[in-house]
């Protein structure tokens, strides 16, 4: 791999890990625990396999040493003379006892893949030790070295003895053809010990693995607990329950908490600065307009009337845009929460008195815990304009309902039993300065103000038909957490 390719591979791998850890919608704690648990399980499985394999190989090596010693004894005790092959007594009680699990055989080659039995230990008790057909060829290739293999058993079940067999091809003085010496030992004890060792090892590793996984879980949970606390405190700031992060955190997380506090301070300073600029602009614009109105006075004539009319329009436009600028600034604030029920109750009482001569009844319903994520003044202006407009067009009844919709939003529905509004006129009714009936008082900016304030908070307003016969206004606004 070239240097350029290696340099490109490292960032790619880093981005892959970053995407895996930073994937949205997944728990970092769960991912860390699963990752650590996976590595622990893999390490323990490899450890268990290595220990079991090593134990079995070590046992077979010890068994191989015993088999090599038996072969050496048999070779030393074997003589090749004119009367044939003879084996002197071997002082090993186990090879003298029938079917003891320890055996030896002396044989000679007969063809390419067959052996002819010459002598054997008394422990064979008349049984024959089967030799695989490939063993003679392996012995020739080994050139005197020991060839080892496993034999399924000397006897038939249930008395079957699985054997470990070692064979060697040796040349003796006084004989032209070499002899095959075979030794076999019952390996059932080795297999039993290996199974017991494997059972103990896997049980111990399983207990160790469970302990490590629990330790990792506790370590991750305890290690990330300050982050969970910081998350909850930031949520409290957003809900308006606290203004700043006040708790002290570990040295690794404290800088993050301090940066969040600096961000909150900067946001507050920015909003206050915007409010000051808006106030200065309002003063700078309204003073010349007041001078124009004063100069026009009550003088008759076309020019004074024109000055008074256009000045009022300009004042309305200034108020509208200043109100929009203030709302945009306030919408950036965190921690603001206004109860919906309190504002609806105040507006209902006030507007019923205003339209007392018309006999309008305002019926409203809203959960006590429902709150608007914004300033009270803006909510009063939004709902005040909507409810006042409904009272103007209603015959007798105005109905208001509010509730959460999920995902941090809420909906307020304002309905009346008036004549309603044709569908082709609804879009125009939301335009700035639009008036559906010139006989009703007002400047036509009410619904436009509602639209502007709603959009400033990321909300939406929709007009529809009400089952009461009049107009239904659906207002979506950000909801504050309880």
Image: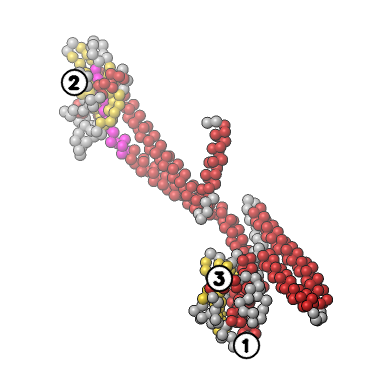
Residue position marked by numbered label 2 in the rendering? 116
How crowded is the residue under tag 2: few (<14 C-alpha within 10 Å), some, or many (20+)?
few
In screen coordinates, is 228 left or right of 313? left
Residue position marked by numbered label 1 in the rendering? 356
Please state which of residues 237 and 414 is positioned toward the viewer in this rendering: 414
Label 3 to label 2, Cα distance in Å? 104 Å
Residue 330: numbered disc: none
Q: To which quarter of the image does residue 305 belong? A: bottom right
Residue occupying image coordinates x 71% and y 63%: 271
Residue 462: numbered disc: 3
Of labels 2 and 1, earlier in sequence is 2
**Residue 278 appears at what percent x and percent y?**
74, 66
- Residue lying furthest front: 302
Please state which of residues 195 and 234 is positioned toward the viewer in this rendering: 234
Q: Identify the magenta region.
A: 179-193
**Residue 440 appears at what percent x and percent y?**
64, 81
Residue 402 visible: no
């Amino acid at each position: 791999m070239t240097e350029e390719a290696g340099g490109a591979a490292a960032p790619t791998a880093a981005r892959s890990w970053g995407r895996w850890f930073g994937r949205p919608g997944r728990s970092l704690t769960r991912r860390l625990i699963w990752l650590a648990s996976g590595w622990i399980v893999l390490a323990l499985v490899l450890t268990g396999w290595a220990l079991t394999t090593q134990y079995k190989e070590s046992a077979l090596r010890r068994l191989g040493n015993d088999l090599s010693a038996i072969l050496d004894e048999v070779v030393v005790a074997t003589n090749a003379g004119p009367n044939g092959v003879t084996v002197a007594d071997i002082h090993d009680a186990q090879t003298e006892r029938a079917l003891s699990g320890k055996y030896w055989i002396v044989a000679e080659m007969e063809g390419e893949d067959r052996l002819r039995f010459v002598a054997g230990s008394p422990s064979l008790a008349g049984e024959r030790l089967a030799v695989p057909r490939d063993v003679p060829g392996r012995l020739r290739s080994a050139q005197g070295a020991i060839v080892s293999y496993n034999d399924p058993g000397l006897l038939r079940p249930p008395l079957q003895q699985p054997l470990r067999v070692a064979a060697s091809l040796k040349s003796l003085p006084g004989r032209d053809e070499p002899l095959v010496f075979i030794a076999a030992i019952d390996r059932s004890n080795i297999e039993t010990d290996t199974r017991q060792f494997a059972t103990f090892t896997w049980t111990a590793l399983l207990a160790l693995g469970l302990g490590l996984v629990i330790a990792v879980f506790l370590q991750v949970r305890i290690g990330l607990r300050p982050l969970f606390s910081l998350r909850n405190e930031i949520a409290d700031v957003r809900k308006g329950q606290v203004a700043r992060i006040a708790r002290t955190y570990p040295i690794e997380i404290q800088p993050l908490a301090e940066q969040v506090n600096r961000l909150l301070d900067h946001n507050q300073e920015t909003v206050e600065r915007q409010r000051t600029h808006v106030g200065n602009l309002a003063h700078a614009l309204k003073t010349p307009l007041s001078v124009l109105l004063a100069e026009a006075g009550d003088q008759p004539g076309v020019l004074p009337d024109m000055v008074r009319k256009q000045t009022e329009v300009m004042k309305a436009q200034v108020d509208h845009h200043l109100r929009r600028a203030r709302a945009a600034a306030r919408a950036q604030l965190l921690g603001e929460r206004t109860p919906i029920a309190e504002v609806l109750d105040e507006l209902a009482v006030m507007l019923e008195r205003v339209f007392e001569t018309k006999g309008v009844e305002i019926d409203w319903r809203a959960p006590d815990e429902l709150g608007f994520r914004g300033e009270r003044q803006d909510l009063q202006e939004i709902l005040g304009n909507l409810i006042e407009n409904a009272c103007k067009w209603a015959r007798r009844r105005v109905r208001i309902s509010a509730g959460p919709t999920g995902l941090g939003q809420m909906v307020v529905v304002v309905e009346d039993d008036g004549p309603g509004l044709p569908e082709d006129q609804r879009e125009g009714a939301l335009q700035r300065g639009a008036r559906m009936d010139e006989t009703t008082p007002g400047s036509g900016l009410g619904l436009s103000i509602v639209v502007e304030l709603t959009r400033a908070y990321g909300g939406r307003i929709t007009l529809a038909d009400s089952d009461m016969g009049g107009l239904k206004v659906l207002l979506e606004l950000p909801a504050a957490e309880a």
